[in-house]
Image (cartoon, helix red, strand yellow):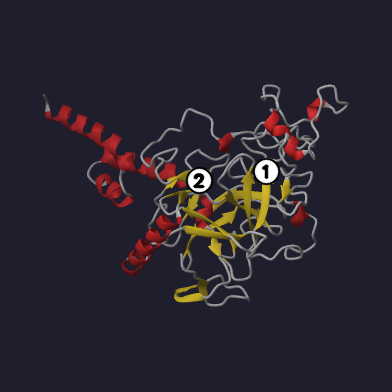
Amino acid sequence: MADSQIQGRVIAVLTQVMPWLHLKDLASLGRTCRALAATAASLNLLRANDIARGLERFPVPVFNTVDHVLYPLFSYSPFSILRSSPPLLPWGSLSRPPHKTPSNARPPSPSADICPCVASNSGQILESNSATNHSQLCMEADSPPISKRQREMPPLCGHLLEGELAYDGDSRLHCLSMSSKSDEWVPSNEFLSIIECGPACGCSLRCKYRVTQHGLSVKVAVHKDHLKGWSLRAMNFIPKGAFVFQYAGELLTTMEAQSRQRLYDELRKTQAEFAPSLMVVREHLPSGNLCLRLNIDATHVGNVARFVNHSCDGGNLQPCIARLSGSPIPKLVFFARCDIGEGDELTFSYGDVHGCETHPCFCKTAACKGFLPFEET
């Protein structure tokens, strides 16, 4: 076999391997010959143009004028996964999965002002001969019939845990959209609890009470800041009360979260650029006798929410806990606390607990405490 043929086969094999390499290894291999340099450049351009890799409704570009790091390294997932589960699209894969995912499902229809689920209509079932215009129903024609179990469910879907209606006619968080000020209804460091339709309901993904189940709902971009590192900015106007995205990552037990936090603390001592994205949400039940934990680690697998930075003034995002009827695992989701302009950085409060002076804060707001909130995991 001629040397040129052998070289061609080696290049062909390396081309298949290159998508799975670390960014530094990819750059090193790309310097060996023109063919591999072209492959490396194509891969880098593809990832920088859309870090979501086609898994969201909108591409998520990356912009970095600070250093030569083209994009952050992690596996993208539009929704949370169990620690033992593989990501929807592994790091080296270049093609989208063939099956439909919640992120590319159609958003709720604005005209869907009645949900057929018993749990969304005060226990009343909409009869087929009802005078209601069937085009307004949010259940598609092929949706399964309502079961006896569903008829006995409490009327909670589409409401806050306290019983208030969750969304207005534009699918915006009602308690935010109705107020004239962002902080008039709810403190920024408190979590609202929302009940949405889910697996136990008879409606489809087009139901207006499934607002948080369609992945990224606005156009955003990842930017590199010389002080904060990676950050997330809005690419268009976001109205107050609009759903933005969920915080997706690996779902961990408390022991797993504590173990990873210890590991990350050690890594940060030797790697200045290492930025873990382990989120721990503590929800105190109304009785006050029980605290529920939600541990989400977006360090290795996650979505755009991993780039949202802290702001001591509460930021422009309102964190909420969303529970789906029939699903045992809640979600951490974010809505716009105020009108967000194009180019504005998206931020929220990481908490108001005691800070750790080894991790400085660069939010630059009037309320800045100088260091990031810190709490034992």
Q: Residue at x 51, y 59 (%)?
A: 280
Reading the image, the residue beneath label 1 is 196
From the image, state whether disc 1 or disc 2 is nearer to you: 1
Q: Residue at x 46, y 58 (%)?
A: 278
Q: Residue at x 58, y 41 (%)?
A: 327
Q: Label 2: how many residues lie within 10 Å, few (<14), some (14-19) or many (20+)?
A: many
Q: Residue furthest right?
A: 131
Q: Judge whether 75 appears above or below 127 on screen.
A: below
- In terms of secondary structure, where does tag 2 sit? loop
- In terms of secondary structure, where does tag 1 sit? strand
Q: Is residue 173 visible to us here? A: yes
Q: Residue at x 80, y 62 (%)?
A: 180
Q: Position of residue 250 (x, y in %)?
A: 45, 49
C-alpha separation, residue under disc 1 versus residue under disc 2: 17 Å
Q: Quadrant of the N terminus?
A: top left
Q: Position of residue 207 (x, y in %)?
A: 70, 35
Q: Position of residue 26 (x, y in %)?
A: 30, 46
Determine whether, in the image, residue 346 is placed left or right of residue 87. Answer: right
Q: Give the mark, 1 or 2, whose residue is nearer the N terminus.
A: 2
Q: Nearer the viewer, residue 1 or 347?
A: 347
Q: Judge whether 306 appears above or below 139 on screen.
A: below
Q: Is residue 38 visible to us here? A: no
Total count of labels: 2
Reading the image, the residue beneath label 2 is 80
